[in-house]
Image: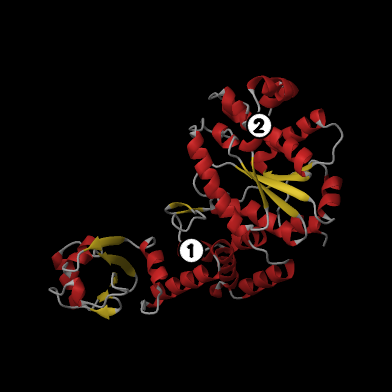
Amino acid sequence: MTLYESLLWRGMIKDVSNEDLAKNHLNENSIKFYVGYDPTGQSLTVGHLVQIMRMKYLEKHGHKPVVLIGGATGLIGDPKETQERKLLTLEESLRNAQKIENQIRKLLPDAQFVNNYDWISKVDLISFLRDYGKHFNVSYMIAKDTVQKRLAEGISYTEFSYMILQSMDWVHLYKNENVKIQFGGSDQWGNITSGLELMRKVVGEHDAVGLSSPLLLKADGTKFGKSESGALWLDENLTTPYEMYQYFLNTSDNDLENYLKLLTLLEKDEIVDLLDKTKAQPELRIGQKRLAEEVVRFVHGEEKLKEALAVTEALFNGDFSSLSENAYLMLSKTLDTVELSKETLVMDALKETKLASSNREVREFMQANAVFVNGEVVTDTQIQLKDVKIMYEKYIILRRGKKKYALVILKD
């Protein structure tokens, strides 16, 4: 397959402004393309991996990614479908921009990074209205899907002008950085085509092309990237590698093919082989395990993947003795965790961690040999935490029954 055909097979293309031009650009080498990220939060989510993985895939095939951080557009806000965005301060926007840039740099170390605050902040109001606003027809802007969905509730001029700013980005990158392609999610298609229209009016004849990809949804149509506790973040302090691994390990068979195509760099033959093996022996979850490994390895690296696998194994078999100290840190963000003094009774620790609701219940669990402290059965109601096995001088794993866990961190 050509690269363009491969992107189609992987489901990475939905809308194309000029298919012939897109094929020509993608099937030759060293074309610059860009994807933009507004710093509306301090971390990207797993949902952003679709665009990041596509950039990595194109880079793998010889093209050059340009990552645009929206230090300026983040101050305005891309219109949401439901309500006005809360405006960030300049300090918040620039701080978030740096965090997101650092996050993406780790995943795309060879990409070129630009921040649109560097050029948009230099455009004065009169120049904005005369040089850019003059080229945008209000009827054209109102017809865009994102604006249409907000007309009934109302949309501020600030958010209404967002598509002009994003269009300015592409003109700037095309003229100054020779960027030929813009990629985005299908929800960005209106902004992408607006950029092409501004390009036509400002530059004249050009060879820029826009492409969008479908938003990643589960097979049942629900939003991708949400766990029971909320969004899945790329920041390991917000979502641990273990939690990310578990999310993808529990991928449904119906979603597996889509996720393997969009969220890994595996080529077609390997993906087809994984799907065949999973279909033949679904109970082994061969495809899901490989998916989870590939995603965690890409986002967090080999060592974090090993720790996530070690935590998974420990929670399965109840043996935490071989975990690294970093793995305990991962557990502290995953399990119900409390800080207690060394003099605390184990029975009180069980109540503090909600593994038991009363002294009577603790005694019943202990009499049934159902209370474990760092893997060892405890039956003495008067034993203190300082008298049990302690890992790395501060961590104690409490377990009730087979699968109910909590973590105690001893106070200094």
Left or right: 317 as drawn, with respect to 235: left
The Cα–Cα distance between marks 1 and 2, rounded to whole angstroms, is: 36 Å
Q: Which image quarter holds the N terminus? A: bottom right
Q: How is the image coloured?
A: secondary structure
Earlier in the chain: of badge 1 and badge 2, it is 2
Residue 146 percent across, percent down from the top left: 62, 32
Residue 363 percent across, percent down from the top left: 15, 72
Tell me whether circle 1 and circle 2 mark residues in contact (CB < 8 Å). no
Image disc number at residue 241: 1
Residue at image position (48%, 63%) is 241
Residue 196 percent across, percent down from the top left: 77, 35
Q: Residue lying furthest left in this view?
A: 382
Residue at image position (65%, 51%) is 51
Left or right: 189 as drawn, with respect to 408: right
Q: Quadrant of residue 344?
A: bottom left
Element on which disc 2 rests: helix
Image disc number at residue 394: none
Q: Which amino acid lies under the numbered mark 2 shown in the image of this protein?
A: Leu
Q: Residues within 10 Å of mark 1 (few under 14, many from 20)?
A: many
Q: Say which residue label 2 marks.
A: 165
Element on which disc 1 rests: helix
Residue 74 percent across, percent down from the top left: 56, 37
Is residue 239 placed above or below 316 in the rendered structure? above
Front in this rendered view, residue 118 or 52: 118
